[in-house]
Image: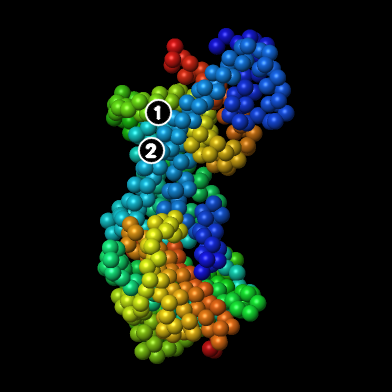
C-alpha cells in the first residue's frame, strides 16, 4: 500500500471507478492518469481483481440466500393452521377505475362476484386436483381480490371497471368492498343467516338494506361454500392448460368453455382456474363472458387469494355511521 | 384474458405500492434483508437464520404496514432489531464468534472470509456495501432503503470499498 502521497486524493476516484460510480468525465481523466502513474495503476489493478472476487462471493451468497428464500416461501405456503401467529389481513392500496357512477355498479358487482365464487373449486382428476377439492373444503375463511370489467365489443371501450376485496367466513358471513382510487365506495354485508343484505356507500354517506328471499340467501351461501363451488365446477368438461408461473407461483390450470358456466349469465363463457402446485389451492381465476347478443364482453379476474386467514367477526358486522342516510331501495 | 392478466400483474407488483403477498415480499426483498443481516452478524449461517426470522415476523405483522412504498425500509428496520437481539443473546450466552460452524467447502470459506472483513468495517459502511453487492448495485434503491441521499450512499460506498481493500490486504499479509 505504498502509493505516492500526491496520488492519495485519487484513491477514492479509483475506488469509485472500480465500483462503476465515477462520472464519465472524471473517469476519462482518471484513465489518462492511470496510463502514466504506476502506483495508481497498481492500486486500480488490485481493486479490480478484488472486485471480481467480491462480486463472485456475493453471487454465491445470493445463490445461497435464494435457496433459503425458496424454502421460506414454501414454509409460508405450507404452514397454514399450525402457524405460530395467524396470517392477518394485509390490504394495502387498491386502485379502482370506474368510469360510470359507482354505486349502481357496486351493487351489481357484489352479486356478480358471489356468482363467481362458483368457480373457485375445480373439475379435477390427476395428480393435484383431487387434493385441491379436499384443501378447499377445509377452508373456513379466506380473502381474495376481484377485478371486473365490462367492454363494449364494437369499439373496445371499457364501460365499467371495478376492483373489490371479498372476505368469506363460513361462520360470520360474507363481506365485499368495492374500491375506486384507493377509496372504498361500496361495502356489502351478507350475514350467515337471515335475508337482509346491508350495503353501505361511504362516498355518498348512504346505506340500504336489501331484502332477499330465504331461497336466494341459501343459494348465495351454497355458492360461497367451497364444497358447493367444486360440485358446480366439476359438472363441466375442461381442458388441461399445463403449468406456468401465475402471480409469482408455479400453477397448473384448467379451462372450461361452456355457456352454462356461471349459471348461464353469459351467452358464451370461458373460465380458467389456476392452482398453486405446492399448496394445491386456487391462485387465480379468469373468466371471459359474452352477453347482450355479443355486444358486451365481461372479464372477471379473481386473484390474491389468502386462504385460511384469521378474520375477526367485526369485519362482517355492518358498520353504518350515524350520519349516513337510508336509501329507500 | 391476457389483457386483464397483464393489467392485474402490474397491480400486484409490490414496488408499485399495491398489494403484497408473503411470496412477493420474500422474492422482492430477501436480498436486501440478507445483505443487512450480513452487515450485522458474525457468520453467514446466522445471517440466513435472521433473514428467515425477519420475514416470519414481517408477514405476521404486515397489517401494521400502512405505506407500501416503505416496505423495504420497514423490513430493514425489523432486520436491524433482529440483529441487535442476536448480539444481545450472544453476549448473554457468552458467545462471541468462536462458536460459528467451521466452513466446509472452499465457497463457504470464501464467503466467511469476506463476511469477516465486512464485519470489521465501521458501522456506517457495512449496510451500504452489503446492500450494494446484494441488491443489484443500485444507489437510488440503497438511498431509499437507508433514508440517506444518493450522494451520501456513493461517498460511503467508495470509502467502504477502500477500507475493505485494506482489511482484505491485511488479511492476506
The chain identifier of the residue carrying mark 1 reads B
Residue B92 at what x, y percent from top left? 31, 30
Tell me the number on the disc at residue A11: none
- Label 1 SS: helix
Q: Residue at x 40, y 90 (%)?
A: A213
Residue A232: which quarter of the image?
A: bottom left
Residue A134 at what x, y percent from top left? 27, 68
User: Alpha-carbon neighbours of circle 1 within 10 Å: few (<14), some, or many (≥20)?
Assistant: many
Q: Is residue A31 above or below residue A182?
A: above
Residue A43 or residue A328, whichever sits in front: A43
Residue B22: which quarter of the image?
A: bottom left
Tell me the number on the disc at residue A64: 2
User: Alpha-carbon neighbours of circle 2 within 10 Å: few (<14), some, or many (≥20)?
Assistant: some
Q: Is residue A242 left or right of residue B6?
A: left
The chain identifier of the residue carrying mark 2 reads A
Does residue A62 appear anywhere in the picture? Answer: yes
Q: Residue at x 67, y 16 (%)?
A: A35
Does residue B62 appear anywhere in the picture? Answer: no
Residue A8 or residue A57, whichever sits in front: A57
Q: Is residue B152 left or right of residue A28?
A: left
Residue A290 or residue A210, whichever sits in front: A290
Residue A94: which quarter of the image?
A: bottom right
Q: Residue at x 42, y 61 (%)?
A: A89
Q: Residue at x 44, y 44 (%)?
A: B30
- Label 2 SS: helix
Please state the total of marks drawn on the protein image: 2
Q: Is residue A207 above or below residue B52?
A: below
* Quadrant showing the N terminus of chain A: top right
Look at mark 1 in the image and give the residue it sits on.
Answer: B111
Residue A195 at what x, y percent from top left? 39, 86
Whole-number angstrom distance, CA of label 1 to CA of label 2: 11 Å
Mark 1 touches mark 2? (CB < 8 Å): yes
Amino acid at each position: 500500500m505504498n502509493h505516492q502521497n500526491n496520488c492519495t486524493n485519487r484513491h477514492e476516484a479509483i475506488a469509485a471507478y472500480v465500483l462503476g460510480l465515477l462520472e464519465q468525465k472524471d473517469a476519462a481523466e482518471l484513465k489518462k492518469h492511470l496510463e502514466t502513474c504506476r502506483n495508481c495503476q497498481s492500486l486500480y489493478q488490485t481493486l479490480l481483481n478484488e472486485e471480481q472476487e467480491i462480486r463472485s462471493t456475493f453471487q454465491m451468497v445470493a445463490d445461497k440466500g435464494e435457496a433459503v428464500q425458496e424454502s421460506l416461501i414454501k414454509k409460508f405456503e405450507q404452514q397454514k393452521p399450525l402457524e405460530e401467529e395467524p396470517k392477518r389481513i394485509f390490504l394495502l392500496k387498491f386502485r379502482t377505475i370506474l368510469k360510470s357512477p359507482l354505486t349502481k355498479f357496486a351493487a351489481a358487482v357484489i352479486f356478480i362476484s358471489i356468482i363467481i365464487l362458483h368457480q373457485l373449486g375445480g373439475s379435477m382428476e390427476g395428480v393435484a386436483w383431487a387434493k385441491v377439492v379436499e384443501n378447499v373444503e377445509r377452508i373456513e375463511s379466506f380473502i381474495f381480490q376481484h377485478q371486473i370489467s365490462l367492454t363494449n365489443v364494437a369499439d373496445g371501450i371499457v364501460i365499467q371497471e371495478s376492483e373489490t376485496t371479498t372476505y368469506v367466513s363460513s361462520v360470520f358471513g360474507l363481506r365485499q368492498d368495492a374500491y375506486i382510487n384507493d377509496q372504498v365506495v361500496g361495502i356489502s354485508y351478507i350475514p350467515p343467516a337471515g335475508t337482509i343484505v346491508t350495503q353501505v356507500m361511504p362516498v355518498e354517506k348512504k346505506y340500504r338494506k336489501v331484502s332477499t328471499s330465504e331461497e336466494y340467501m341459501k343459494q348465495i351461501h351454497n355458492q360461497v361454500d367451497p364444497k358447493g363451488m367444486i360440485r358446480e365446477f366439476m359438472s363441466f368438461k375442461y381442458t388441461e392448460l399445463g403449468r406456468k408461473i401465475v402471480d409469482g407461483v408455479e400453477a397448473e390450470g384448467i379451462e372450461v368453455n361452456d355457456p352454462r358456466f356461471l349459471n348461464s349469465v353469459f351467452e358464451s363463457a370461458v373460465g380458467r382456474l389456476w392452482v398453486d402446485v405446492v399448496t394445491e389451492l386456487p391462485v387465480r381465476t379468469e373468466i371471459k363472458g359474452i352477453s347482450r347478443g355479443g355486444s358486451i364482453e365481461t372479464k372477471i379476474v379473481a386473484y390474491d387469494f389468502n386462504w385460511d386467514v384469521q378474520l375477526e367477526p367485526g369485519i362482517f358486522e355492518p358498520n353504518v355511521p350515524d350520519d349516513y342516510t337510508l336509501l329507500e331501495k | 384474458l391476457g389483457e386483464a392478466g397483464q393489467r392485474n400483474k402490474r397491480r400486484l407488483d409490490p414496488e408499485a405500492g399495491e398489494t403484497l403477498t408473503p411470496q412477493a415480499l420474500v422474492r422482492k426483498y430477501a436480498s436486501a434483508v440478507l445483505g443487512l443481516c450480513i452487515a450485522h452478524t458474525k457468520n453467514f449461517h446466522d445471517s440466513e437464520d435472521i433473514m428467515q426470522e425477519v420475514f416470519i415476523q414481517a408477514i405476521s405483522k404486515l397489517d401494521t404496514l400502512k405505506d407500501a412504498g416503505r416496505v423495504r425500509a420497514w423490513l430493514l428496520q425489523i432486520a436491524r432489531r433482529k440483529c441487535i437481539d442476536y448480539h444481545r443473546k450472544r453476549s448473554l450466552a457468552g458467545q462471541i464468534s468462536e462458536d460459528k460452524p467451521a466452513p466446509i467447502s472452499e465457497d463457504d470459506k470464501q464467503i466467511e472470509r469476506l463476511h469477516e472483513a465486512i464485519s470489521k468495517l465501521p458501522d456506517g459502511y457495512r449496510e451500504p456495501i452489503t446492500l450494494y453487492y446484494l441488491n443489484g448495485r443500485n444507489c437510488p434503491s440503497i438511498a431509499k432503503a437507508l433514508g440517506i441521499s444518493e450522494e451520501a450512499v456513493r461517498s460511503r460506498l467508495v470509502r467502504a470499498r477502500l477500507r475493505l481493500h485494506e482489511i482484505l490486504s491485511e488479511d492476506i499479509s
